[in-house]
Amino acid sequence: MQINLVVKLTLILVFGFSLNANAQRKSKKAKPKSGLYIQQEAEYYFIEGEKQYILEDYAKAVTNFRSSIQLVPTNDVAYFKLAQIYNKTNQLAAAKLSIKKALELNNKNSYYYLLAADIYTNANNLKEATQYYELLISKVPGEEHVFFQLGAIYLYLQEYENALFTYQRAENHFGVNEQTSVQKQKIYLKQNQIDKAIAEGQKLIGAFPNNPKYVIMLAEVLSANGKETEAIGLIENLLNKSDDIEDVRLLLADLYRKTKQLDNFEAQLNLAFGSPKVPIDAKIKAVMKYMALLPDTRLEAILPKLCDKIVKVHPTDFNSFLLQGDVYSTFLENQLVNDSEINMFKEKAVQGYTNYIRFDESKFNVWQNLLNLELQQNAFDSVIVHSQQALAVFPNQTWLYLVSGVANLSANNWKESIFYFEEGVKRSGTNNQMLELFYGYLGDGYHKIKEYQKSDEYYDKALMINPNNELVLNNYSYYLSLREQKLEKAHKMSLKLMRLNSENLAYLDTYAWVQYKMGNYDEAKRVLKKVVENKEANAENYDHYGDVLYKLGEIENAKIQWLKAKEMDAGIENINKKIEQGKIIQ
């Protein structure tokens, strides 16, 4: 391999210089470094360590701090920095050694004690941590703020006497304050020293007589320990002094309830809920607390009215509408409503949810509750509108396609219902429960638009999933009988339906109508007679019974049944002609 002449010359110069320099070093004795030079070099390594620490390159930082310590072994700050790094990187054994060395070199730096306490806390050695806090307080003046951390650790360790002693030292230094009194109060309550806990609350009130917060805190302690009457006195006295703290009425109401003063309980709730000064969150929390106590006659009478009051007082907060919807629907679900009030409760629940979704469309369960309630009200136009709005937000929620399809089917929007059912099938995947429903409804929808082959196909699909689907067995067999097609199949399905549920009037009517279409008039009469004897019989049942009687030659009796059908529903097809002409009109 050839080397370029210029490069060759450069190498000779470099190596020549290096050899010459080495020769010169060997010829002279090395001079010892001065103290100033060592100090400067140590500072250099320390500064480099700080840079790397800031950059979070901890490995390089450790190397530099160690180099600094090698030059100046008494550098306590370098040991402190090493301890910081080891603590951050969870090298706790090394951290303990480093901070111990730092404290040996300098026991007057508060940061060293605090880091030592932190290291032992991270090592789950809280007892050792407390010793460093104690040393800090004794060695470094002006660090009394540590009393609060120290007291908290003693409390966690359940060393209650040490905790009380520590909080008392804090109080002696800082004076009466909320933190020490509350912590001491907790300890006394744990030790069942109720009187001492109450005394701490009274001490706070005495030190800060113009702060109602401490009166409320003491009242809560009294209430929690069976001293509700004393708590009531405190709160009533507070309200007499100032009526600007309306939210305290919720606490007073609860105290009245606990002491069975139910009229006062209700009065205070009404005052609190009627006040815009009481935050809506506090009102909602109160309602939910009392909802958990249902059933309760008094609460059942109060809670819905309180929800209405929240809506009135906080009309711009959409959470008021959500609460109204939830409370009214919960009452309905738990059957806590008189029959005469059911419709009103449904309307209120729908009103609450409808107002809520104008502000927030993101909660699917709210849409579910709203649509279910509207279906119960047969408010199909509203269901159609709201289900479409919900689908715009949740286009992959299969249930919404089912609901929209059912609403359109019920509103005689046959083609629209088929569209939603078919879209639902696409999103059902392998969910047979949903597919069974969609197939059954598609059978109904295609029957309505007279696409009978598709109707039968979907009914068959539904029955393949569940051969005992009563609704499909009923509709399929009835529609076949109307078309006078596959009557033997219709007969088998209607017979199966009878075995599954022989008390359902609609199913009995279907079975009888299949028998009628097959010419089995006596059997049809026997079954329909049973149907019309039931007070729940409808116009169609009487109309069918009249037709059967006509076929058996009982003309006058048939006209009587047709008249009854007309009285119940004058819109039955050809009912007037049947009565006038005394015969069946197809």
Image (spheres, helix red, strand yellow):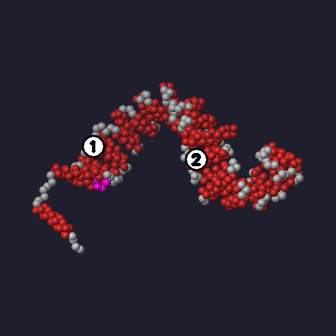
Name the magenta segment's main secondary structure: helix
Reply above or below: 200 against 489.
above
Give the magenta range.
Answer: 57-61
Q: Quick check: can you spot residue 328?
A: no
Q: Amino acid at mark 2?
A: Asn
Which badge, 1 or 2, comes first in the chain's sequence?
1
> x and y percent of residue 497 in the render?
74, 56
Residue 355: give x, y in percent of width and height.
Answer: 58, 40
Q: Is residue 39 magenta?
A: no
Residue 59 included in the magenta stretch of the image:
yes
**Residue in the picture at 67% in, 40% down:** 342
Whole-percent x and y of residue 335? 65, 42
Residue 163 or 35: which is nearer the viewer? 35
* Quarter of the picture holding the N terminus: bottom left
**Which residue: 34% across, 34% down?**
173
Q: Position of residue 319 (x, y in %)?
A: 55, 40
Q: Nearer the viewer, residue 85 or 423?
A: 423
Disc marking residue 209: none
| Residue plotted at (81% across, 49% down) | 574
The residue that appears at 36% across and 34% down in the rendered structure is 171
- In the picture, the disc for residue 109 is 1
Q: Secondary structure at mark 1?
A: loop
Q: Quadrant of residue 422?
A: bottom right
Pick out the residue farthest to the bottom: 1
Specify whether 216 is left or right of 421. left
| Classed neighbour count for the residue bearing mark 1: other residues with Cα under 10 Å, few (<14), some (14–19), many (≥20) | some
Classify mark 2: helix, strand or loop.
helix
Distance in Å between CA atoms under marks 1 and 2: 59 Å
Q: Residue furthest top?
A: 241
Is residue 481 rendered to the left or right of residue 351? right
**Left or right: 98 with respect to 7?**
right
In the rendered image, which residue does mark 2 sit on?
365
